[in-house]
Image (tube, coloured by chain):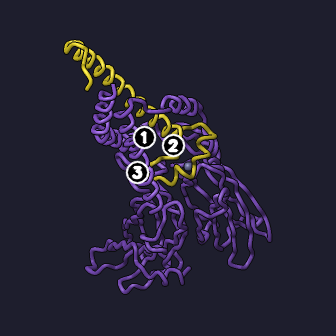
Chain colours: A yellow, B purple
Amino acid sequence: MSRVTTTPNAVSRHAAGTLAWAQASVTFQVALVLVTAALVLWALFFSNYPLVHDTFHELRHSLYFVPCH
Amino acid sequence: MRRMLTACAVLILLGMATARSQAQAEPAARVVIETAPAAGAIVPDETLVTTRLRVLDAAGIPIPGARVALHVDTPPRAKVITTDFPFVEDTTLLELETVLPEGELSFQAVYPIRGTYTFRTRVVLPDGQTLEASPVLSLRENPDEVRNILVLLGLLFAFGLFSGFVIRLTGRPGAAAAAAIVALVLTGGTGWAHGPSGEGAPSQNEPVTVVREADGVRVTATASPDSAAVGRLTTVTVRATTAAGRPVAGNVSLDAIHLEDNVPIYSFDLPLEANGTARVALQLFDGTEHELRFALRTDDGRAVNLEVPLPVEGFAPPLSVKLRSLALLMVPVVVGLAVGFRAGRPFAARRRLSAVSVG
Ligand SMILES: [Zn+2]
């Protein structure tokens, strides 16, 4: 059986700090995922960069609502 | 072609109009438009469709010598969901005016996008009466495109789900940052690859004219403007005369060829008018090289062929259209993320618990 040595006050302070950090981190990570997804999709389907545009030309035309030209 | 039409034997479009005649109570004539294959079997941007327009009397017999003006309008623009050719939406696909010696006209065309096309027809009967009709042709999207987009949306949902789950569990969404940088680099480039570059309003150009003389027949073919553009009509005129300049009687067939795939996207066979000309205006909807091929046959058996090269200018879709489509693609990512995040909750709690008991 283990004994908890920290005081209740310290535990709650530590927990609050972890929670705030976790929340900020989660928001950042969610934003990162969304931005990455948007950027990759943009590069793939909406980029005017000739190499990318031509490479994915047929793919673009084969997707119901992805505009090409 | 006639065999194909009867084989299909499906009346797709039936535009009826009553000749404007106050004296008559019965419909004097009607316009019937049929397609082969039937509308349900037409794949946009793929099927070369035979479209037949007939002017029939009350007994269903074609009326020879009627004159028709036909405008085919492309489907209207949808508010949110675009097609792959946004510049084709809400424009005119083709326009022609010709006499129908046998009361009917057949032409072939590739219909570029899904949706409802309107065939605005105005017919002048030999007795001077006019009738107007606007039959429609509704095309469904290529089933492959529907399947593909569903697969893509499913993958995006799965990506969101996985990310949400991982974020809840570990707080580390893996190589997202690296991917973001790669994507940034890729989007950095500008320019346009498919066909000559162009952004914004199409430029107006001079007409291009090709003349060929053979067998005593002089044929002049003109495309105006010389560089076609997606969303805009190109007027094609062919004129056949003798060397002395007198108009000749005959027929001209015109094929618009998509050179990359070497397939026709339009094919017409039109009689020459009394002044030796035939004219059609058509929209070339792919921003790449095309060629107009003319085959002229005079009534007395002479033949002249000629070709007119025609580049077509393509345009990058408007930013608003791109952003709308991007937003639609992001929906499953967001939903997946939320679902994955929620789904990861019990696992994350268990992880914390085991971490505490170990510590
Ligand atoms: Zn394209």
> Which tag, 1 or 3, sits closer to the chain's start?
3
Residue B231 visible in this rendered orientation of the protein: yes
For this rendering, which residue is in front, B318 or B295?
B318
Q: CA distance from mark 1 to mark 2?
A: 9 Å
In the picture, which quadrant includes the C terminus of chain B?
Answer: top left
In the picture, which quadrant includes the N terminus of chain B?
Answer: bottom right
Quarter holding residue B250: bottom right
Establish whether labels 2 and 3 are both on one chain. no
Circle 3 Cα neighbour tier, 10 Å, few/some/many (<14 / 14–19 / ≥20): some
Residue denoted by label 2: A45
Q: Residue at x 25, y 79 (%)?
A: B25
Q: x, y (%) of residue B78?
A: 36, 50
For this rendering, which residue is in front, B169 or B249?
B169
Q: x, y (%) of residue B188?
A: 57, 29
Q: Amino acid at mark 2?
A: Phe
Q: x, y (%) of residue B131?
A: 37, 70
Q: Which one is in front in this view, the residue at disc 2 or the one at disc 3? A: 3
Q: Residue at x 39, y 84 (%)?
A: B60
Which chain is mark 2 on? A
Q: CA distance from mark 1 to mark 3?
A: 15 Å
Circle 1 Cα neighbour tier, 10 Å, few/some/many (<14 / 14–19 / ≥20): some
Residue denoted by label 1: B326
| Residue farthest to the front, as pictured | A1
Q: Amino acid at mark 3?
A: Gly
Q: Is residue B196 above or below residue B15?
A: above
